[in-house]
Image (cartoon, rainbow, N blue to C red):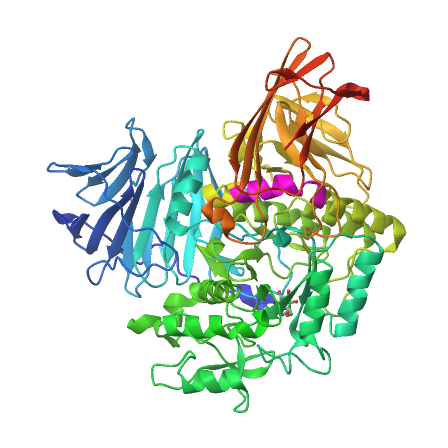
Amino acid sequence: MQDTSFAIHPGNKQQIEGTNHHDIGNVRSFKKKEGRFVFECDNGTVNVLFYSDSVARVVMNQKQDPVLEGSFAVIKEPGYVDVSVQEKDEEVTLTAQEMSLHVLKAPMRITFKDSDGQIIVGEGKKGMGHSHEGKVICYKEALPYEHYYGFGEKTGFLDKKGEKMTMWNTDVYAPHNPETDALYQSIPFFLTLRGGRAHGLFFDNTGKTHFNMRTEAGTYSFSGDSGQMDYYVMAGPGMKEVLSQYTSLTGTMPLPPKWALGFHQSRYSYETEEEVRELVGNFLEKSIPVDAIYLDIHYMDGYRVFTFDEDRFPNAKQLVADLKEQGIRLVPIVDPGVKEDPEYEAYQEGVHDDRFCKYIEGNVYYGDVWPGNSAFPDFTSDSVQKWWGGKHKFYSDLGIEGIWNDMNEPAVFNETKTMDTKVMHDNNGNPKTHRELHNIYGLKMGEATYEGMKNNLEGKRTFLLTRAGYAGVQRYASVWTGDNRSFWEHLQLALPMCMNLGMSGVPFCGPDVGGFAHDANGQLLARWTQFGTFTPYFRNHSAIGTLRQEPWSFGEDVEANVKKYIDLRYIWMPHLYKLFRDASLTGLPVMRPLVFEYPEDKNTFNLSDQFMIGDNVIVAPITTPDTEHRVVYLPGGEWVNYWTDDIQEGGRHIMVEAPLDTLPIFVKADTVVAHGSPKQSTAVKEDNFQLHAYFGKIAEASYTIYEDDGETFGYENGEAFEKSVNLSYDSDVLTITTEDLNTRFTPDWSEITIVIHGAFDVTEAALNGRNVEMEKLDGGKLVITVSR
Ligand code: MIG
């Protein structure tokens, strides 16, 4: 009935939000207890804990003492933080180095301030509260000029001001549109930008949660249908600091194997071994790079996970080996549903060893998914984690190194689209209902899979792709944005969605290139592939029954266009790999909105149709049909058109020409990007490492090269190559200085080709104090080759 006008029947009165809850009331007592601060209030107990000088946690429980253990997202322990306490009649002040909490007593209201005494975020008329039904809510003061980013995987524009959002992992096949709310991922974290200053807020609640950023009344709120009010405030002061603080709590992405960064080809489904071999043959024959091919649900025997259908795939091991010879990995899909079949090993083991989700009464929960009636592993138990991870030996023994997790919201074919919320999760002996833990099912499946594969691969990095997740999912998996469609609107939608995932701690993300459902067309595929070149995750995928969408599916012109951009991905690979390495250390996203770099520039606040790669490259895809021009915003400074070397003065919008085979790209003047060469896959050795420096007014630029073997964890023991290169020029002399920072890994390439763009007057060059030869090309380009 929701799809007809019946949905707005006058009899359907909705409860007005916030009218039915009790305020936390007054503080009755305050004490310090074992490193935390305890406030007993009229309507609940509040604990405050510090995780660092700039991260504090507030937990409110209306029924019992706040539960501080057992977060699924946070892997950091509260730190020893020097906090000075001041108690007055009306207020308690807790002061750490970078942040202080001012707790008004009657009623309890918390204001967070920075070390200058400026308000980070405060509360006003309303603060924390709870309702009879066990809902918890918190209101914060909102200022008219602030902006919100993050919230994981949401449709709509970049800035979430004015939005109302729900977190409840949901399989949404219906076309995603601006009012599609809950999707596959739930990341209840956001950054607030307030007049150039930023702070973060993470609401760690694994049930259904709501964010109301419709701030007209001067407040925003976040609430949970179950669980505690449990949130962290990160003091910033910049957006980058906030993300580092958030990922210091929830973890950063491990450095993926390099092949995971290549171009991936998928289809629901490549159904037989022959089809896969033919597909690979096409890529090789056409010299289109590819690093991974996906096997969707048809590879299995009756959709039983940990099996291959032996008619369709008579020799999976040989297939995997032959593909690997060509530098291509096979990535099979693994869904959580285990077919109810007493003659099937995974089901037998699951029942026998009590691995499945059950009702409190002890009966196994069954839901209908691809294999029919199925049971669902209870990933909240460590023993199930081990069992499931170990089962992946089936794949690793075949030579498989990467896994694709789907349907792990979990999705079930029924009215509610998921598991019965009454199901009980074991949670290592601390049982909780599915209602309370729904949003972590995908995260915990990802953990089991990642850890299992990592263990099985004995020192090789694994790759996991997941559809569902919760805060912290970045520790295990990359995320694709689910079932989009081959609509231009969905290409547009993917930009802010991926940028906000990046600002939610998930740097490794991307949409299905070309669109999953609906028929693609050549122009859309070409433009979408251009965008995909610069999304951290780059996979072409399409649904059963839709037009084929492989690079050659729409004629030669489109094929050449698509190939140009897949090649470009490999040209940019050394730079992207370095940005992934940085992201794995700092938590800062590879793909980021301009506001992340230019938080003082109002033109960037809601800029949703262009993005940055790292801190110096702007990419402005074409996202509408038959369009060969677009406006690009360039922030203050000088920007170099990547294709023409033209220098543009920033701080303005410019009109850019973008014929069908052109993706507008701008590099910030006086910065460097690293390039390699196009190749069939990342398995092919790189023998043409280049640094491109774009000189502007400052005439100075630097870069730190990062390389490692791309497939083992050796880098964790320092087996990497790092070298800094500094370039500057003064009137007509170019000075290059290099420094080896780490040479414990030896790259495939032995020379670095330095290409300087915009060095018109240079007549001489010196490398570490000695004259070097240089080659002058047209257009102010200069080429110098230095040894590694
Ligand atoms: O449509 O496994 O989002 O990528 O191809 C339901 C089949 C199941 C949903 C995934 C999609 C995948 C498909 N799956």
Say which of 162 and 336 sits in front.
336
Labels in figure, total: 0
Say which of 5 and 41 sits in front.
41
Vertically, is 407 above or below 187?
Answer: below
Q: Position of residue 457 (x, y in %)?
A: 53, 64
Image quarter where ligand 1 lies: bottom right
Identify the magenta region.
569-581
Residue at the extreme right of the image, as rendered: 556
Vertically, is 597 above or below 768?
Answer: below
Q: What residue is rendered at 37% in x and 70% in y? A: 382
Q: Position of residue 22 (x, y in %)?
A: 25, 56
Quick check: can you spot residue 450? yes
Tell me if 296 is positioned left or right of 150 in this view: right
Tell me if 570 is positioned left or right of 336 in this view: right
Vertically, is 622 above or below 762?
Answer: below
The verdict on residue 574 being magenta is yes
Q: What residue is rendered at 21% in x and 38% in y? A: 82
